[in-house]
């Protein structure tokens, strides 16, 4: 139950590691004249599973339900 | 927010008198808890007595103790040299709480008095015996992930959310109180209450009484200490479980120990039996594990918080190991 | 801000007349205190119409905001955040949550970073308040503002005024000695766009640059 920002935990700075942004240097002439294309929401599909797998690798616990909170690793 | 009258008290006496004689009057210090609760209509004082002009900010040391004024800011206490030298456990616990901005506002007295963060207490559409006596406890059969495993009653299973309180109960602090009937002191461990049949009462402060200071007698717990807070994110979140651990070591022998837990009961939870079991023993993970098992005797989980029955002892062992430096 | 149904909205005197009457009576007795809304006492003494008195239930408030002395009248229930935004049109300070949970409303009061949403304006009497509007010197950006731009420390920008005010204080407090320390002591400012790594870089640069902040 998270009815506000004190209970619904979005990450804070202490949670977030350095993020490396990778630019794919390839023109897309169809989308727009600039040739650029945003990825926006596409990576969102895979990243939770990727994190869950990384956590599995680190802890040996494969959690199949989000969020990945500390209580689920006991 | 409802209308209220605001009064800036210039003396302790007038602050106490005004608050004692008016059922709807309350003190305000940092305001970080009270203003929040007033905005939500959970607490509805008609008169606010601002105590910030009272001379209760000092932190000083004399004859074998540190005295911390009730209006000392959480950030000021956490950075104070006397506190860091003599009671580092308290500084650690304070820095684990809230955020830098909130610690710049929150006072020691206000922190002691902060109310539970139980979502049923916060949601005025829900039953809550603490907010509205007799309305029932929404958490008992509801979403009780953050709730108590010790000392609860069928009226209330909320926890005290403070980090500072866990350190202060471990350090055997004394609370200094001034009231309409004079001054008194209360051992910190007796300041907060278990819910019993009166969950609306968080502590034993009487109407109109003002916390003036907290005192900690000098102790040998200035080296091997650790405050461990387990929470859903790395900072700016209330504890699922926290442990204040302080060891007095002679080589590898435990000469003295203080242990308390947060996030597990309606009051900061001192682990006296586990302490007894540790004195005289040699530092080792096995010893700590045994003590943790003793500490958890009598604990009972609810539908969503049973994880604390496992997280609790693990946290005790980790905190003791870190305090002893054997990680 | 949540209004309680049974009680008074501004201009809704009928529902709160009872307590208002008590309040007026008591106010006239309270001589021991530094502050009692003078007009209200006067209203009580001269038995003014309570409706008129109600509209006068504001208190005098003197404080300095961004170097400008202000002499204002505010209701005690007005937060510093609402005073800045609604009464003084200083809308740089943002309201994210209004409950102390996000840091968007961070301002400096007497040089300390605090949350203006949980500060009653009347409690800032006599204090010096600095908001994001008071950081730059004329057209010259504050080093932290410049560093946020250089490091792309924002996306939508909503959290940014709070982040910058908090960042300046974080360095001044001496809590910017490592990335880890910055991350911990800046965790009270939430950014939903996720500009955290760039914000940390900006703070590191200002700290290492040693500029006057
Ligand atoms: C988003 C958020 C996150 C937080 N996270 C944490 C956390 O992780 N850990 C934690 O420990 N705390 C946390 N807190 C709570 C914070 O520590 C408290 O709100 C704060 O300590 C209250 O102190 P204050 O001076 O602002 O009290 P106020 O809000 O001014 O007062 C609180 C209560 O204490 C009474 N009071 C104040 N001073 C005295 C006195 N001297 N004598 C008698 N009564 C008095 C008031 O009447 C009122 O009832 C958080 C708060 C928020 C908003
Ligand atoms: S608006 Fe003040 S902390 Fe969110
Ligand atoms: S830049 Fe959008 S919330 Fe921070």
Image (cartoon, coloured by chain):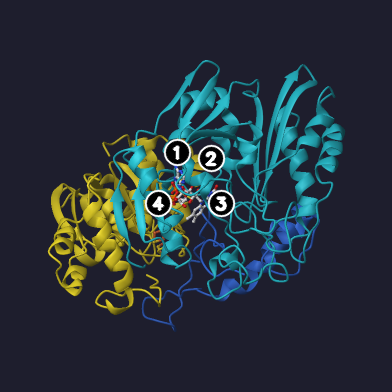
Chain colours: A blue, B cyan, C yellow
Q: Which chain is disc 2 placed on? A: B
Alpha carbon of mark 3 to alpha carbon of mark 2: how far?
24 Å
Q: Would you say the residues marked 2 and 4 are in contact, meaning their CB atoms lie under 8 Å apart?
A: no
Query: Is A57 located above or below residue B246 in the figure?
Result: below
Residue A6's place in the image compared with B87, above or below, is below
Residue underneath mark 2: B94
Can the viewer see residue C168?
A: no
The answer to whether tags 1 and 2 share a subunit is yes
Cβ at disc 2 under 8 Å from ligand 1: yes
Residue B233 in the image, given as x and y percentages of width and height = 60, 55
Nearest the viewer among B289 and B327 is: B289
Q: Of the residues under marks 2 and 4, which one precedes in the sequence?
A: 4
In the rendered structure, the answer to whether residue B107 lies left or right of residue B157 reads left
| Residue linked to disc 1 | B75
| Residue under the image location 83 percent in, 50 percent down | B298
Confirm or reject: label 4 Cβ below 8 Å from ligand 1.
no
Verify CB contact (< 8 Å) between mark 3 and mark 2: no
Say whether marks 4 and 1 touch (CB < 8 Å). Answer: no
Give me the chain letter of mark 3: A
| Location of mark 4 (residue) | B21
Please report contact status of discs 1 and 2: CB closer than 8 Å, yes or no: yes
Circle 3 — which element? loop
Which marked residue is nearer to the observer: mark 3 or mark 1?
1
Q: Of discs 4 and 3, which sits in the foreground?
A: 4
Quadrant in which the C terminus of chain C appears? top left
**Residue named by callout 3:** A17
Q: What is the chain letter for disc 4?
A: B
């Amino acid at each position: 139950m998270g009815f506000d920002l004190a209970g619904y935990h979005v990450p804070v700075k202490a949670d977030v590691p350095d993020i490396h942004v990778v630019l794919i240097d390839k023109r897309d002439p169809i989308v727009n004249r600039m040739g650029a294309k945003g990825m926006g929401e596409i990576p969102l599909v895979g990243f939770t599973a990727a994190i869950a797998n990384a956590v599995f690798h680190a802890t040996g616990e494969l959690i199949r339900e989000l969020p990945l909170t500390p209580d689920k690793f006991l | 927010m409802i209308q209220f009258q605001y009064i800036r008290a210039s003396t302790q006496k007038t602050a106490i008198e005004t608050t004692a004689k008016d059922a709807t009057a309350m003190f305000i210090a940092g305001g970080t808890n009270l203003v929040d609760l007033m905005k939500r209509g959970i607490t509805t004082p008609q008169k606010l007595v601002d105590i910030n002009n009272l001379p209760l900010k000092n932190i000083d040391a004399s004859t074998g103790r540190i005295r911390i004024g009730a209006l000392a800011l959480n950030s000021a206490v956490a950075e104070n040299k006397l506190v860091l030298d003599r009671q580092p456990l308290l500084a650690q616990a304070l820095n684990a709480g809230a955020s830098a901005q909130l610690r710049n506002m929150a006072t020691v007295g206000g922190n002691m008095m902060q109310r539970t963060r139980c979502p049923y207490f916060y949601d005025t559409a829900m039953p809550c015996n603490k907010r509205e006596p007799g309305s029932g406890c929404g958490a008992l059969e509801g979403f009780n992930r953050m709730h108590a495993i010790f000392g609860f009653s069928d009226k209330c299973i909320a926890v005290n959310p403070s980090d500072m309180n866990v350190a202060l109960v471990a350090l055997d602090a004394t609370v200094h109180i001034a009231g309409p009937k004079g001054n008194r002191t209360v051992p910190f461990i007796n300041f907060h209450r278990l819910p019993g049949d009166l969950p609306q009462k968080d502590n034993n402060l009487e109407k109109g009484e003002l916390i003036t200071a907290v005192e900690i007698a000098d102790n040998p717990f200035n080296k091997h200490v650790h405050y461990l807070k387990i929470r859903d994110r790395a900072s700016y979140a209330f504890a699922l479980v926290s442990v204040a651990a302080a060891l007095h070591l002679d080589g590898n022998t435990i000469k003295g120990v203080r242990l308390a837990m947060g996030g597990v009961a309606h009051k900061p939870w001192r682990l006296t039996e586990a302490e007894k079991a540790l004195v005289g023993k040699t530092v080792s993970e096995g010893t700590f594990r045994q003590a943790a098992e003793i500490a958890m005797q009598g604990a009972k989980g609810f539908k969503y918080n049973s994880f604390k029955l496992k997280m609790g002892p693990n946290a005790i062992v980790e905190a003791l190991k870190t305090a002893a430096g054997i990680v | 801000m949540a209004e309680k149904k049974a009680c008074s909205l501004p201009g809704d005197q009928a529902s709160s007349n009872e307590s208002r009457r008590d309040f007026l009576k008591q106010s006239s007795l309270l001589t021991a205190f530094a502050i009692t809304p003078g007009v209200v006492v006067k209203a009580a003494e001269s038995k003014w119409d309570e409706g008129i008195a109600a509209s006068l239930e504001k208190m005098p408030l003197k404080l300095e905001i961004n170097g400008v002395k202000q002499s204002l009248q505010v209701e005690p229930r007005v937060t510093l955040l609402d005073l800045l935004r609604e009464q003084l049109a200083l809308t740089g300070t943002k309201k994210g949550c209004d409950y102390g949970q996000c840091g968007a409303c961070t301002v400096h009061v007497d040089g300390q970073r605090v949350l203006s949403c949980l500060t009653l304006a009347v409690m800032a009497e006599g204090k010096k308040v600095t908001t994001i509007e008071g950081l730059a010197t004329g057209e010259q950006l504050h080093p932290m503002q410049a560093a946020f731009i250089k490091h792309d420390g924002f996306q939508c920008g909503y959290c940014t005024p709070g982040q910058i005010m908090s960042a300046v204080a974080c360095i001044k407090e001496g809590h910017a000695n490592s990335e880890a320390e910055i991350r911990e002591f800046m965790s009270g400012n939430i950014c939903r766009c996720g500009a955290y790594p760039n914000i940390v870089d900006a703070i590191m640069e200002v700290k290492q640059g040693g500029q006057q902040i």
